Image (tube, rainbow, N blue to C red):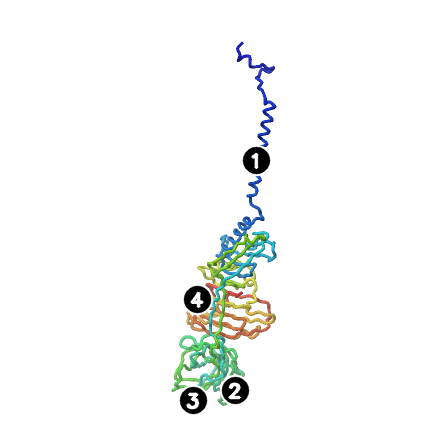
Amino acid sequence: MTACEMSVTPTLSGLTRRRGFTLAELVASMAVMSILMVGLGSAILIASHALPDDKRPATRIVESAAAVSQLVEELRSAIWIRERTATSVEFSVPDRDGDGNAERIRYAWSGTAGDALTRQYNAGTVINVVDGVNEFDLAYDLQAVTEEYPGAPVEGSETLLMSYENWDDKYEAHVHDNQWWAEYFKPSFPVNAVSWRVSRVWFVARRDHADDTTTKIQLRLPGPGNMPSDTIIDEVTMKQLSLTDSFQWVEKSFSDAGGLSPSQGLCLTFITNDANSALLWVKDKNVVLSNAGLIYGNPGWQYIATNQALLFYIYGTVSTPGPPQTATRYYVTAVRVALQAGSDSAARVVTTAQTLNRPELLSGLWEADFDSDPTLDHNGDGKPDWVVHTEGSFNPGSLSGGVWSADQTLDSYPNNDFTQLTTVELRFRSTGVGQGPVFRIASDWSESTYGPMFALLQLQADATQTLTLYHQLDATTPVVLLVVPGLSSDFVTLRLLIDPNQDTVNVKVNGHDHGTYIYNTFTPSNNNRFASVGPSGGAAQFAAVSVRVGE
């Protein structure tokens, strides 16, 4: 047997049994492991001091910087700001998710140390973006843009505007159902006149027969060739039985014939649907009178004779601009942000957000360019911009190429009192003779009064358009503030600048200033606190509408 063979000890299973650790080896190993564990524990303890701690300044700086960075980035794209305080800001940014709606974002802190800085996106849940805030301070760099415009007109005393009286070559003009008469006249005004008004007229008339018939005496805007148009500024009546059997001067007063453009004349018309209503005295030849003429009708208007004239006196007033007024709008150019989480001033983060869109400070904004459904939330205030007046859904088939063929009335939403500087801008037109598009606003609400106004655009037979702006004496009596005739058949741009502090409205049409007017206020009979656009009994189109209410 060899030495190698003798070192292997057979076992019962036939396998080879190996020798284990000795006691000395185990003791030595445990000593080494103890040393290693102590070292490892020390390393872990040292490393733990380098891990982030919610209360450490470095952690707070990182947390605050991330929140401020997000706020700054969002403010840069703001399109308007509706809330601004030292501890809160709410603004809208352009559509981010492709649904056609702008997005609404609000950051706020209670002002109490230890409370969280919160953020709300649209109507979502208010979330904490930084806990334990000791300071959140916002400061706004504003750009004030001041516009000067003509002040409210000062109306002069009543004066004789125009007249003609010559008793030679007189002619009796019968007024009956197939014979109408009119006198075109255009007074001369001072160069600074902004509007004029007819208060009363005199003419010579007598009874034709003893019939109880009626003559309508109207003031109409002239159309082509200074012939009477269908636009009636004011109207009174004359009973034949109120006349005598001999010619006499007759006086008729008008209450609504104001807001007339100095560049525009009028037609004094005498019409009836009755037979033998009255006789007028006219001079039938050799009349020399500028900007005037006698107009024949049978009953439609036939021609104008500039060498003939009605015997007449026109009285009224002329308005000239008052002291200039100003309107100031405010735009945010930058927002300075300071945020400190925790009590350590070393964690304070300060930066400035430069706004790219120069958002305006507004309490309300309603716009539509009619490229898409105007009842979406384009302004990002969490509500539809416009709603159908009679409820129901908007008809998308009425939109084409950025133009709305108005078949419904749309109201601005939500309601607003319009008590701050309000700027209205419209692009609209009438596409059918008669009534056309109309804009209404229930402006200047207070506890007991308001000042409603409306603007109506009408297409005339000669393819021109006439714009008329009305205010109201009461709930049922509209009164003309301004008439602008002779506009082209294309889209008309109208801007109304309403200053509730002075009860005035400045009017621009196609960029041309047409003066400033005082509107009436009275006790409302309803609770309509909105602006509206839509048709008024005729074909109407809108290309854009904007209503902006200052902060």
Q: Nearer the viewer, mark 2 or mark 3?
A: 3
Q: Position of residue 451 (x, y in %)?
A: 55, 71
Q: Position of residue 71 (x, y in %)?
A: 52, 55
Q: Which residue is mark 3?
A: 166
Q: Amino acid at mark 4?
A: Phe
Q: In the visual, does 445 lie left or right of 461?
A: right
Element class at badge 3: loop
Gap between marks 2 and 4 measured at Cα: 47 Å
Q: Position of residue 125 (x, y in %)?
A: 58, 53
Q: Nearer the viewer, mark 1 or mark 4?
A: 1
- Pick the residue in front: 234 or 153: 153
The reply to whether discs 4 and 3 touch (Cβ–Cβ < 8 Å) is no
Mark 1 or mark 4: whose residue is earlier in sequence: 1
Gap between marks 1 and 4 measured at Cα: 86 Å
Q: Which residue is mark 1?
A: 39
Q: Amino acid at mark 1?
A: Gly
Gap between marks 3 and 1 measured at Cα: 127 Å
Q: Amino acid at mark 2?
A: Leu
Q: Which mark is residue 491?
A: 4
Mark 2 neighbour class, 10 Å CA radius: few under 14, some 14 to 19, many 20 or more: some
Q: In the visual, does 85 lie left or right of 514?
A: right
The reply to whether discs 2 and 3 touch (Cβ–Cβ < 8 Å) is no
Element class at badge 1: helix
Q: Position of residue 64 (x, y in %)?
A: 54, 52
The reply to whether discs 1 and 2 touch (Cβ–Cβ < 8 Å) is no
Q: Which mark is residue 243?
A: 2
Q: Amino acid at mark 3?
A: Asn
Gap between marks 1 and 2 measured at Cα: 125 Å
Mark 4 or mark 3: whose residue is earlier in sequence: 3
